[in-house]
Image (cartoon, coloured by chain):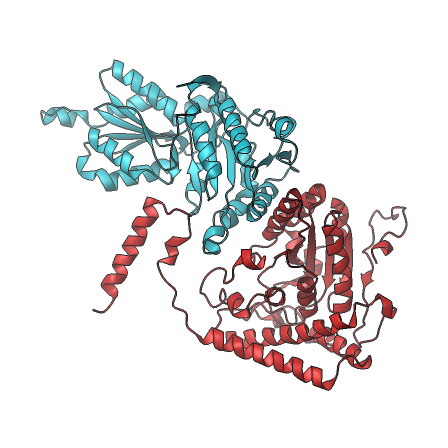
Chain colours: A cyan, B red
Amino acid sequence: MTTTKVTMAQAINAALRDAMTADDSVVVFGEDVGRLGGVFRVTDGLTADFGEQRCFDTPLAESGVVGMAIGMAMNGFRPVIEMQFDAFAYPAFEQVVSHLAKMGNRTRGRVRLPVVIRIPYAGGIGGVEHHCDSSEAYYTHTPGLTVLAPATNADAYGLLRKAIEYSDPVIFLEPKKHYFTKEEVDLENDVPSIGRAVVRRRGTHATLLAYGTGVPLALAAAEQAALEGRELSVVDLRSLVPFDDETVAAEVRATGRAIVVAEAPGFASVAAEIVARVQEQCFHSLEAPVRRVTGFDIPYPPPKLEHHYLPSVDRVLDTLDELQWDLDDLAGFTR
Amino acid sequence: MFAERTGSDQPPMDGLYPAPPLFSLIDSTGGRQAAESELPDSVDLLAGYRSLVLGRRLNTQASALVRQGRLAVYPSSHGQEASQVACAAVLRPGDWMFPTYRDTVAIVERGVDPVEVLGMLQGNWHCGYDPVKHRVAPQATPLATQLLHAVGVGHAARLKNESTVVMALCGDGATSEGDFHEALNFAAVMKAPVIFFVQNNQYAISVPLARQSVAPSLASKGLGYGVPAFRVDGNDLAALLAVLHQAVARAAEGNGPTLIEAETYRIQAHTNADDATRYRSQDEVDGWIAKDPLLRLRSYLVNEQLLTDEREAEFNADGEAMAARVRAGLSVDRPADPADLFKFVFATPTPQLAAQAAQLRAELATEEPS
C-alpha cells in the first residue's frame, strides 16, 4: 500500500489529472480555472500540462458555463466544471434544474449528460456573504441529479474519479474549509462507491449521521463523548443521492439513537429528509426521537458571528444528552 | 451582403448605431429586388416553395387537431414558414439544430417525422424524436436556454476538428433573457460555429416588440458581443436562404457565430389557449397577411415561369398526403407505460426509485380487473 500525504485540494487536482490522462474527452472549464488554477488552486497546472483545449477559462457567467457544458456533453465530452463558490452557482440554477437534471429523462435515455459540477461549499472559513452557503438541498430535491459530498481527502479523490466516469450529471460538493487539510491518502486502493455510506467509527450508544463538513465535527464529538462514557457510531454518508438507506438504517438500529449533523439550515433540509427516513425505517428500534444538529434557519452569518451558527461539538453533545437516557435507566435497561 | 453592413467608420452622433438594413430579394408582390444572379438557384427556390406548402399545411393540420382534442396545444408558425424552412434547408447532414416549441415546421423540414414531433404535444412524452439520430435537440420551452447548449455543441465540434454548424433558434422575447446574452458572448469569445437565428414575430405572447426592447433592432444586440449581425425579411425565402447560407459557410470555416434577425409575424395567436384580439388589431394582422411568405414566392415563381400548374398541384397533393399521415399517426392512441416514469431519470435507477416503481406496479396490479 502506497500512501501519500496531500491536502484535499491536491487530492482533487490529482483526480482531475488522472481522469484527463485516462480519457481525452474529459475537459475542465469555468471561471479562473485556467492560468490561475482556480481561486483555491484546485485546477493548478492543468492548463499548462494539458493545454488550453482541455482546461480553459470561460467568460464570467455561470448559466453560460453550465449551459455550455450541457452542449459539450451532448457532443461527446465529459465536462468537469467549477462554480467558484456555492452561492455563485445560483445564476446557473435554471440550466441545472430544467436541463442538466432532466435531459436524460426528457429524451428517454437517448441523451445522457456526463457533467460534473464541482462546488466549493459550506462555511467555517470567515468568508464574506455569498461564499459560505450549504446549498445541497436545492440539488438533492431535484430528480435526476446525483449529489456527492465527500468529507475525506481519499473520498474527494475517489468519488471525483467515479463522478467523472458516471453517465449522469453529478453535483460534487467540496468542503472548502478542508481544502488545505493534509491527510494520508492511498489513491489506488481507497475506492469509494457512489451511493454507499461508510462507517467511520463504531460505538454502541448512539449513531451520528453526517456528510461533508459534518463528518470531522461528528468524529470530534464522538471522541469527546467517549471520554464522557458514551461510545458513538459515526456514519459518513458521502453520497446524498443516491442515498444509502441500508447502511444508515443498520447503523441506527444497532444503537437505537441517532443525531444528524449538518451545517445547512435545518428546515426542509437534507438533515430533515434523513430524520424522516430513519424514523420510517427504524421506528421499532428507536429509544429516543431522532434529532438534528444543524445551522439555524437564517442566512449564513457574517464572519464574527459564524461560530454561533455552525454546529459544534458542544451542541452535538448537548443534543446527545437529551436522547432520553433516563428512560433507559427507569426500565433498568442499558445498552 | 455581408460587406454592406459597415457603413461609416464614424460612430453616430447620438451614440446609437442604426439598425442594419433589412435585406430582401423578393418583395411582397413577388417582384425581384435584386439582380437574378444574386438570387438562390431556382431549383432551390422551387424546392423551398414545396416546403412552404407542406409547412403551411402542417400548421393548419396541427391547429385543427387541437380543436378536435387530439393535441393538447400547438404553437403555430403560420406566417413564419419561410423562416422555418430556410433555417433547416441550409443545414448539412452533420449539422445540429436547437429549436423551440414554435419550430415544428423547421424540425420537419430537417427530416424528422411530424408524427414524432407532435407526440410531445399529444402528451406522450417530453420529446417525441431521437435528438442524436436527427441532430435536432429537444424543443426548448424555457426561453433562450437552448442557445447555450448550441454553443457547447459547437465548441465541442471545434475541439474535435469537425466542421459542424449549429443552428440555434429563438424568438424576439427570448432576446431579453440572460441566456441569450451569455450565449452570444460565449460563442463570440469561443468562436463557436453557431448561427443565432431570431424569428422576430413581433410578439412574446401578448407583449409587443416595443415593450421588449428599444434597441434599434434585435440584430443590433450582436454589436455588444462582437458578433456579426444581419436583418433579413423573414417572409422572403430567397433572402433568408442567401443570408443563412453565408452564415453557415462562415461558421463552417471557423470564423465564428452570426446573429440573424428575421422580421416576420405570428399570424395565429400564441397558442389555441391565447386570445390575440386582446392585444392587437385585425388591421395589423391583415397587413402581415398581405406579406405572406407563400404568396410572394408563388407570385415570383409563376411570373418567372418556374412554377407550373402541374407542379403546384403536385405540391398541394404532397401536402394533403402529409396531412393525412399526420392525422392517421395521431389518431392512434399510444398507451403510455407508467413504468417509463422511473426508467430514464438516471442511467442506473437509485434504490429509492426502484422502490417507488415497485410501489406503482403494485398499485396498478390491484387496480386491474382480474
Residue at far bottom of view: B309
Q: Residue A140 location, x and y as percent?
A: 42, 41
Q: Quadrant of residue B265?
A: bottom right
Is residue A112 among the parts visible in the rendering? Answer: yes
- Relative to B63, is A214 above or below? above
Q: What residue is drawn where x is 64% and y is 44%?
A: B160
From what the image shows, is residue A73 above or below residue A123?
A: below
- The x and y percentages for residue A51 are 65, 31
Q: Residue at x 61, y 43 (%)?
A: A64
How many tags in the picture? 0
Image quarter hosting the C terminus of chain A: top left
| Residue closest to the eye, B85 or A235 | B85
- For the N terminus of chain A, the quadrant is top left
Is A248 displayed left or right of A120 in the figure?
left
User: Relative to residue A24, is residue B336 drawn left or right?
Assistant: left
Looking at the picture, tell me which residue is in the foreground, B165 or B352.
B165
Residue A63: percent from left, percent from top = 59, 43
- Residue name at image x 88 percent, y 69 percent: B35
Residue B304 percent across, percent down from the top left: 82, 79
